[in-house]
């Protein structure tokens, strides 16, 4: 079986980047400085970004904590990769949960996450239209515990809104103490066919 290594990812907000910021809304807690562009960089070597950006948020992909075997299988069979040509809209939603959440034992967090809040069951209804990747920041001493990233086509933007509103009304969100909702858009690339949802737009990579 191919080994999947954790991937270090940085999100740099400033005046440059392949994504244009459509809006930044502070849902809870301390806001982020407003910016006009955003870049996602898949590389551990991101030190040079600090001077050029208003802010840089870092996270790392990891193993699942809560998803059961059945949920993992359902996710794998439905989810599509990031970078689809038709995904001209994206959302970066950095989230921090409260100390009360982190003090709970694992089984209680799982109960709130799924048995009470139906996070995975609800999310699955929006796949494959929405492609997603979860980045963890807590163990890196980052300001946000999670950097959640979603990509979708312009015509699915209203449905994505519906998903976000459903999740925010759950018991899980009682434990969210900081959340900033950043909505993004990029131009559809011309000159290449857009029909294949498997066509990829690669994020920027920085060689270490
Ligand atoms: C697009 C549909 C979605 C699906 C299929 C989905 C699925 C998942 C799964 C499977 C996990 C748990 C991974 C694990 O076992 O550790 C997770 C975690 C998480 N998701 Fe989603 N999700 C979706 C949408 C969203 C949205 C819209 C948000 C934010 C508004 C969000 C925020 C989070 C957060 C913060 C976590 C980490 C929870 C924790 O570890 O405490 N998700 N998601």
Image (tube, rainbow, N blue to C red):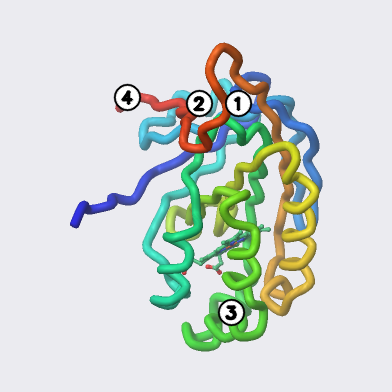
Residue at horizontal 73%, vertical 40%? 183
Residue at horizontal 41%, vertical 67%? 64
Which of the 4 quarters of the picture holds residue 189? top right
* Left or right placement of residue 185 versus residue 201 in this view: right
Percent of width and height locating residue 115: 60, 85
State whether residue 93 appears in this view. yes
Question: Does residue 21 sit above or below 144 in this rendering?
Answer: above
Can you tell which of label 1 and label 3 is closer to the viewer? 3
Give me the C-alpha separation between circle 3 and circle 4.
39 Å
Question: Are the two marked residues, 1 and 2, in contact with CB atoms closer than 8 angstroms?
Answer: yes
Residue for badge 2: 49
Give me the C-alpha separation between circle 1 and circle 2.
6 Å
Question: Does residue 127 sit above or below 167 in this rendering?
Answer: above
Residue for badge 4: 207
Can you tell which of label 2 and label 4 is closer to the viewer? 4
Question: Are the two marked residues, 2 and 3, in contact with CB atoms closer than 8 angstroms?
Answer: no
Residue for badge 1: 53
Categorize mark 2 by other alpha carbons within 10 Å: few (<14), some (14-19), many (20+): some
Residue at horizontal 75%, vertical 45%? 157
Which of the 4 quarters of the picture holds residue 95? bottom right
Tag shown at residue 114? 3
Question: Does residue 91 sit above or below 110 in this rendering?
Answer: above
Can you tell which of label 1 and label 4 is closer to the viewer? 4
Residues 89 and 192: in front is: 192
Which is nearer the N-term, disc 2 or disc 4? 2
Residues 41 and 161: in front is: 161
């Amino acid at each position: 079986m191919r080994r999947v290594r954790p991937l270090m990812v940085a999100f740099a907000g400033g005046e440059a980047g392949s994504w244009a910021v459509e809006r930044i809304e502070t849902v809870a807690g301390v806001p982020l400085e407003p910016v006009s562009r955003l870049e996602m960089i898949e590389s551990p070597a991101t030190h040079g970004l600090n001077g050029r950006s208003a802010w840089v948020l870092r996270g790392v992909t990891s193993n699942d904590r809560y998803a059961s075997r059945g949920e993992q299988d359902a996710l794998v069979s439905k989810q599509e990769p990031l970078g689809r040509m038709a995904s001209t809209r994206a959302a970066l939603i950095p989230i921090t949960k409260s100390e009360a959440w982190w003090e709970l034992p694992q089984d209680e967090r799982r109960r709130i996450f799924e048995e009470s809040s139906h996070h995975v069951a609800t999310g699955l209804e929006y796949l494959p239209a929405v492609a997603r990747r979860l980045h963890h920041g807590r163990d890196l001493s980052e300001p946000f515990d999670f950097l959640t990233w979603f990509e979708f086509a312009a015509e699915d933007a209203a449905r994505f809104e519906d998903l976000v509103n459903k999740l925010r009304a759950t018991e899980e969100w009682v434990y969210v103490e900081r959340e900033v909702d950043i909505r993004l858009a990029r131009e559809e690339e011309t000159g290449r066919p857009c029909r294949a949802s498997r066509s990829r737009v690669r994020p920027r990579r920085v060689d270490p």
